[in-house]
Amino acid sequence: QVQLVESGGGLVQPGGSLRLSCAASGFTFSAYVMNWYRQAPGKERELVATISSFGGDTRYADSMKGRFTISRDNVRSTVYLQMNSLKPEDTAVYYCNLRYYGKDYWGQGTQVTVSS
């Protein structure tokens, strides 16, 4: 069965960096687009970044462009989100996402808190 497991969240000061990881299993990882979403308290879940199956095409929400980088390792079946220049408004639970046969799969999420 499809499994997505995020890690790497934590508490970081404004201007700091974090690298999130999402380990995937249960499907042919290299064949699918992968996404990162986030959900801040009291807000709807929003798309952060998307990466194509072989990593050649990446897309970002406007507020993340230039600060976040999505990447993947198809040998390790892992997708990453490098987050730099973090701001307090980046505080949220970050989720890995796969759309597989018309169904959305989510990990458990990893909390990112940006605060001094």
Image (cartoon, grey):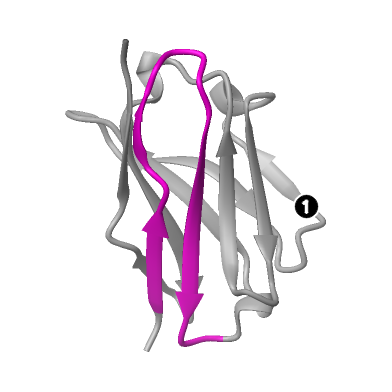
Q: In this view, does 42 lie above or below 15?
A: below
In the picture as drawn, the residue positioned furthest to the right comes out as 56
Left or right of 4, for residue 116: left
Report the residue marked by disc 1: 57
Question: What is the magenta range?
Answer: 3-27
Q: Is mark 1 on a helix, strand or loop?
A: loop
Residue occupying image coordinates x 52% and y 86%: 27
Q: On the rendered image, what quadrant is the C terminus found in?
A: top left
Q: In this view, does 114 lie to the left or right of 96?
A: left
The chief SS type of the magenta part is strand
Q: Quadrant for residue 94, please give it.
A: top left
Which residue is rendered at x = 59% and y = 74% of the image?
A: 77
In reply to whether residue 13 is colored magenta, the answer given is yes
- 27 up-or-down from 3: above or below: below
Residue 79 % position (x, y): 58, 60
Residue type at numbered disc 1: Asp
| Image location of residue 21, percent across then percent down | 50, 55
The one nearer the camera, 13 or 90, is 13
Question: Residue 103 at what x, y percent from top left?
Answer: 39, 74
Q: How many labels does the image show?
A: 1
